[in-house]
Amino acid sequence: MENQLISYLETVKKSTVSLHELEKLADANDTYEDFATALFSLLDRGYLHAVKSHDTNWRGLPHTFRIQKGKVKQPLIDSIQKLQFQVHPAIQLRAYFTSSEKVWAKDQPWILKINDYLNKYGLPVIEANSSQRSYELVQDEKWIDEKGGRSLLEKINLADRLNIVKSPDPLMFALNPNGFTSNKTVHKHLIVENKATYYGLVDRLPLTGCTSLIYGAGWKIASSLSQLPQQLGLKSDEIQHLVYYFGDLDYEGISIYYYLFEKYQVQLATEFYQTLMDKPYFKGKENQTANPTALDHFLQHFKGEEQEKLLNLFQEKGYYPQEALSKDELQNVWRRAKWAQN
């Protein structure tokens, strides 16, 4: 009961609180004697002082209490100060001194994730969009823009120090000269994550049914893809864009794809991944973190044996870079893919 009362006192912004307000906190299983005992304890420990001019009730409890803010906040302040000495110096926790224990408890796990990133990599010197930086910091590409991350970063004085680009770079792509016919209403596009794969496929583009081959450049595609219809001059409600994705077969590549799927309904170019899985995998990238939702969605695109192969791959901490496929292999896959036909 005492802890419940203290938690409530932390949230009270005024300097006094009435007995009637505190009585509302009593649980149905608590007797009034239990409630009174807890309040007398808080009076004895200095969390509350009686406002004597307001008299007392039948049990001797003051009708009004003066909250001793310093005493109530001290455990929270001690916790914040302790962590401040432990985290990266770029993280500033002063804003939490005026916050509540509930807010501090909610934000602390995110602060620790950010601290791990800064201790490992330091403040980033390379620009990134918010989706990429969000994934790097907390392994959730939506955290900054959609889950309150930007507000937290501002609170700990990091929002302007993480080199987050507000305006996305222009989309990088090659055009199929045969892809622009006057009556064409469906345009297909293939995104590849890495530059080597882009150059391995670009010569094949005019022989496919795709309008463009897009160089994704890792997480940059997360923000720049929105510009595709405008940059192509094909921005119309009557025109449909079907976008396919092929990235590295690792946790980060899967997370990029899943982000694009959720935001732009991008589809998976499964044939490339199936060809990758016929090769020996590589070891490394142990520091990447899985996005379970993204991984589950990714696995649904493959059959039973292929799913087992993929699960074993990640269990063994393996991965496939796009570069594992030669130029001939890349072009053969694209040539055979049904979705890439006219």
Image (cartoon, grey):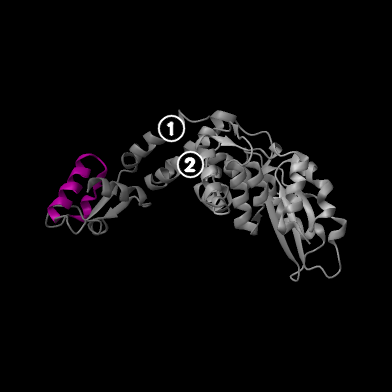
Looking at the image, is 237 positioned above or below residue 63?
below
Quadrant showing the C terminus: bottom right
Looking at the image, is 159 positioned above or below residue 8?
above
Q: Is residue 317 left or right of residue 257?
A: left
Q: Please name whichever residue, 205 or 279, is drawn nearer the observer in this view of the structure.
A: 279
Residue at mark 1? 83
Classify mark 2: helix, strand or loop.
helix
Q: Please name whichever residue, 284 or 104, is drawn nearer the observer in this view of the structure.
A: 284
Q: CA distance from mark 2 to mark 1?
A: 13 Å
What amino acid is found at the position of numbered circle 2 in the picture?
Answer: Trp
- Indicate the position of residue 205 as horizontal and vertical percent values: 82, 51
Q: Is residue 281 left or right of residue 39?
A: right
- Residue sitting at x 19%, y 52%: 62
Local crowd at mark 1 within 10 Å, few (<14), some, or many (≥20)? some
Q: Quadrant of residue 24?
A: bottom left
Classify mark 1: helix, strand or loop.
helix
Secondary structure, magenta segment, majority class: helix
Looking at the image, is 157 positioned above or below residue 89?
below
Residue 157 appears anywhere in the view: no
Magenta-span inclusion, residue 39: yes
- Indicate the position of residue 162 as horizontal and vertical percent values: 62, 38
Task: Read off the magenta span.
Answer: 32-55
Q: Is residue 164 left or right of residue 318?
A: right
What amino acid is found at the position of numbered circle 1 in the picture?
Answer: Leu
- Residue sitting at x 77%, y 52%: 335
Magenta-span inclusion, residue 104: no
Q: Is residue 331 left or right of residue 35?
A: right
Residue at mark 2? 110
- Indicate the position of residue 65 as horizontal and vertical percent values: 25, 50
